[in-house]
Every structure is written in C-alpha cells, then in structure tokens.
Image: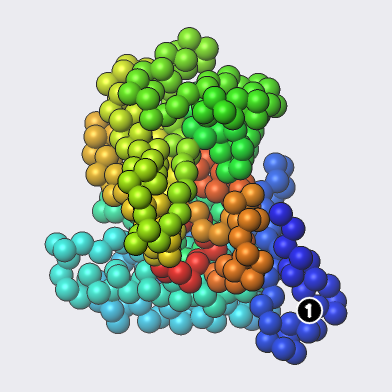
Amino acid sequence: MTDSYSRLINTPLGKRAAKALGLPHPVPLRRYEPGVEDLPGREVLVLGGEGADPLAARLLSQGRSVHRHPEPRTAYAAVIADFSAAAEPGDLQETALALGHALKGMAAHGRIVVLGRPASPQDAPGTAAARAGVVGLMRSVAHEVRRGATCNALLLEDGVEPGSDDAAAPLRFLLSTRSAYVNGQPLTVRPGGAATDPDRPLAGKTAVVTGAARGIGAAIVRRLSADGARVLLVDVPAAGEALTNVANEVGGVALQLDITAEDAGRRIAEAASARLGPIDVLVHNAGITRDKLLANMDEARWASVIAVNVSSQLAMNRQLLDSGALGPAPRFVSLASTSGIAGNRGQSNYAASKAGIIGMVAAEAERFARAGGTVNAVAPGFIETEMTRAMPAVTREVARRLNSLQQGGVPDDVAQAVGFLASDAAAGISGQTLRVCGQSMVGA
C-alpha cells in the first residue's frame, strides 16, 4: 500500500514544510537486500567498561572501525552501550551520558544496541533497579533517535558475556537491516546462540507456515524460502488457489487444511514427512478477526476467534511435540499482536486470543527446551496490508504515525523477525515476544 504522505514529505518542498510546521517526517527505512552491507558505514562505537573489550575486539576483527569513546565529527553506523556490569543505579551514568554525546553523530539508519542483564526478584534491590533502569533508558533513547535509526536491548543472562558467541548472533540481527522496524524492544539471551549464514540462515531446514496464502503469511513464506528453507504452506480450502500460487512461486508444498480440525497437527506432520522431511520450523500465522464491541459480542464471534487464533496452536503444539516428526532443534514462532498487549476497542475476542499467545509461548518454553527447541512470538503493530487498507483514511493515517519511526511497517518486516527467531541465531531466545511495531506508542 502506498503511503502518500511519506512520499510527499520526503520531497525537498515536503521536508521544508515538515520542518517549518512541525509535521511528522518519516524517513524511508533502509531494509534488507542480499549482498548489501547491513550497516551504513564502518564506524562503530563501543561504550562501557573493560567487560566490553572482547566485544570491541570481535567487531574489529570483522573489519569495523571501532571506537571506545565518542569523538567529534564522527558519524557512527552503530553504537553498542554495555551496562551489563551495572550493580547500582549510579553505575548507569557514565555510559548513559557517553551514549548521549554519541547520539549527536549517529548516521542515518544507524543502530544502537544496549546491553544489560535481566532483572530478577533474586537480585539485590539496587541491582534490580539498575537492570530495570537499562530498559527504561533504552526505550527513551528509541524515542529520541531520528532518520531511520533504532535502539534496542539485549539482556544477557548470567553466563552470557557481551563479546561471547552466545550474544553475537542476536546482536548481528539487531544491528542489521533485517530489524528495520524493530525499535525500543528488549530481548533476553541465554546461552545457545549460533552463527548462521547471514544471507541463508535457514539453509536445509523444513518449515511449515499456516495462513500462508496471502498477506503476512505469504511474506513469511517468501522470506523463509529466500533464507534457504523448504516450505509446507497451510491454509483453508477456500484459499486454495492463492495458496497454490504462492507454493508454486517458492517451490513449496501446499496443504489445504482447517487448523481447528482435531487432527490438524497429525496431518501437518504426515504431509511434511512425506514430502519434505522432519519439521525444523513451524510458524503459527493463521488468524481471524470477528470484531464487535463486547456488549454486542455473540458466542459465535467469540468462539471462532479463540478457536482459530490460540486453541488450534495449543492443540497442534501438543500433537507435533508428541509426533516424532520434528527435527532435533524445533523452532516454533507464533503471530501475536500489539492488540494483545494494549487492547483495542471492539477487539476483546481478538485481544484475548493474541494475549493468550504471549502467555502460551512463555509457558511452553520449558517443554520446548526439553525437546531441544525454542518457542517465541512476534507481535506486529501497524503493518501495510489489505486489512489496514480497509481502515477509514483518517484512522489509518493516525495509526501510521503513532510510533517512533512515524510510519507503518511492511509484511517483510514481520517476516524478517520470524526468520530470525526461526534460525539458529535465536537458539538462546525462548518464551519471548518480539514486537515489530516501530516502537508503537500504544501499549509501549
């Protein structure tokens, strides 16, 4: 869908008008292209104490020009601020203020990644305050950066150090153009991340995508295929023609199936085993809306949304984990929504189902770990799709601007996040929900 305002405001006249009138000025995002350098330059600033030295050395070995202190007249393609050793709130000051100086020299489309530790009830109060403070700092900086830059956080569990292999793969994602619409988000990293081919991280994997015939589902299929996966596409019989077209486009296998069927998991396992091999990745994308104010909600609307959006996933997860049809390190990714975080008028059933997905993946993490795998969710915000095209024009325009990047995302932004969580690069991430929303101000 065309964002006419963004196109107009990025003309010379539009830029002058935006500056004079204080209008939003969304900068076209620099998104992933195979073979194109991820960062808009070689200059990388690494802030923090001695614990960040191994990280600086790793980046230097990758051909980056690494700085350890802000320098005038330097445009940084990336800034990594290490707060992982903070034990009291006062420990944040030196690195935070150095980060503030660096913001003045950020390159357009630059990346800021803040490193910290997850706060825990077992922490001393001062340590917990410092660790929680890092997330608040990151979210505020994400609101301050401009020109398509982003700021996110990696919270490293005990045993994961800033310069370690465990941190390297998720750090690469957040520094890359694959995360163009991810802003203001924390990810907790445990030991287990692995290096992958940056252009084909899913080479040799078998992936299943539900709701694959159109929209975000079709974008996910195309992304997983481009990243090297063999794909089994699943959608309802009514979408059969569109499903076949997408399957033919990527050389995948189409399966017409109602995922609310009692044996849906078994049938997916059989189809994958017969045509593609053990399932390494499953993306629960299928979902429906049946919007109505709760005062006017009927049983059919409520029940159908819960059945399709979350109950089917619970049932398929159980069947597939018990089926013997999964690979040795299965990665399941579910599509949640920012509606499940902030709620939305007229969407009590939809919000309940999407919040349910967030709770489900958190609770399933331990069971998937026993199977050698991970389970996570992606929560899109405003994405330019046929669904958002149908919104009233004024509502759509407001929704586009209501995030730090001041624009809607595109389906491939969601697909990139799914592809990351489906890859071995995210082997140290499980039970989490990654928002792909440009740091939406709703539910932030």
| Quadrant assignment, res 52 | bottom left
Task: Establish if 320 lies above or below 173.
Answer: above
Residue 430 in sight in this render: no
Q: Taking 31 as reference, is 205 left or right?
A: left
- Residue 344 percent location from the top left of the image: 43, 63
Q: Residue at x 28, y 41 (%)?
A: 365
Residue 29 in sight in this render: yes
Task: Establish if 113 lies above or below 272.
Answer: below
Q: Residues within 10 Å of mark 1 (few under 14, many from 20)?
A: some
Image quadrant where one finds the N terminus: bottom right
Frontmost residue, 439 versus 179: 439
Frontmost residue, 255 versus 368: 255
| Quadrant assignment, res 175 | bottom right
Frontmost residue, 390 versus 403: 390
Q: Residue at x 30, y 82 (%)?
A: 90
Q: Residue at x 49, y 32 (%)?
A: 210
- Residue 99 percent location from the top left of the image: 50, 76
Task: Establish if 373 lies above or below 80.
Answer: above
Color theme of the render: rainbow
Task: Establish if 144 lies above or below 221.
Answer: below
- Residue 78 percent location from the top left of the image: 58, 64
Q: Secondary structure under badge 1? A: helix
Looking at the rendered structure, the kind of residue marked 1 is Lys
Frontmost residue, 298 versus 400: 298
Identify the residue under disc 1: 15
- Residue 149 percent location from the top left of the image: 61, 67
Number of marks drawn: 1
In the displayed image of the protein, which residue is found farthest to the bottom?
20
Q: Residue at x 52, y 75 (%)?
A: 143
